[in-house]
Amino acid sequence: MAVRQLVLYPEPILRKVSKEVNSLNEEIFTLVADLKETLLAEQGLGLAAPQIGVAKRVFVFRRKLIDGEIVQEVINPVLELRGRTIDSEEGCLSIPDFREVIKRRSVAVLRGIDLNGNDILLELEGLEARCAQHELDHLNGVLFIDHFTIPQKLLFNEWVEKQEWFKLKNK
């Protein structure tokens, strides 16, 4: 297990559609362990494989349970969106220090498999549903900024050009 360096916007891998995982092997076990370690080190809510430079359909996210919290892995996730559309603030570890309100569905049914090859079927609500939608977007090459209105995009473009990490990436 290792804490991996985050991939920051506008790195091209963040716009790439991730490939499906065909077998559970040491590479995937290591990827999931690294995702979990990196998520905890960064104190995030969710993290997708492209955010650490791997274009595989894998993400992890924090789940609250009755007796505590776990970091749930999901391999080859599929979402069915339900519920109403709600506005809520989001951020992204790949775009540090920027948050904005966007629309997401309030309920998401998440399907996939875990590291043991067991089927996952979770009905998520609220923040967990929002997080799963955000992370699945990453696997499809979509960033939360793609959900912005035109005024939000203009504000973001002005903001990002002033950021040191962005200036260093685009020299």
Image (tube, rainbow, N blue to C red):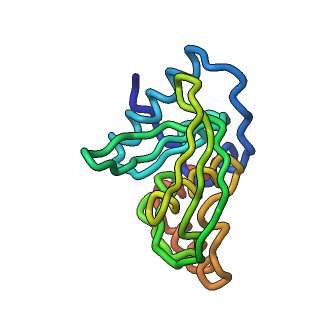
Q: In which quarter of the image is residue 103?
A: bottom right
31 vs 17: above or below: above
Tell me the quadrant of the picture where the N terminus can be found: top left
Q: Which residue lies furthest to the left in this view?
A: 67
Q: Where is residue 135 in the image (x, y as percent from the top left)?
A: 57, 51
Residue 171 in view here: no
Q: Nearer the viewer, residue 11 or 39?
A: 39
Q: Nearer the viewer, residue 63 or 87?
A: 63
Q: Position of residue 124 (x, y in %)?
A: 50, 57
Residue 3 in view here: yes
Q: Which of 42 and 167 is in front in this view?
A: 42
13 vs 31: above or below: below
Q: Quadrant of residue 68?
A: top left
Q: Where is residue 9 in the image (x, y as percent from the top left)?
A: 58, 54
Q: Which of 30 and 75 is in front in this view?
A: 75
Residue at x 51%, y 60% (from the top left corner): 129
Q: Which residue lies furthest to the bottom in this view?
A: 151
Residue at x 74%, y 44% (from the top left corner): 17
Q: Where is residue 82 in the image (x, y as percent from the top left)?
A: 62, 67
Residue at x 53%, y 57% (from the top left corner): 166
Q: How many labels does the image show?
A: 0
Residue at x 55%, y 43% (from the top left corner): 48
In this image, 33 relative to 14: left or right?
left
65 vs 152: above or below: above
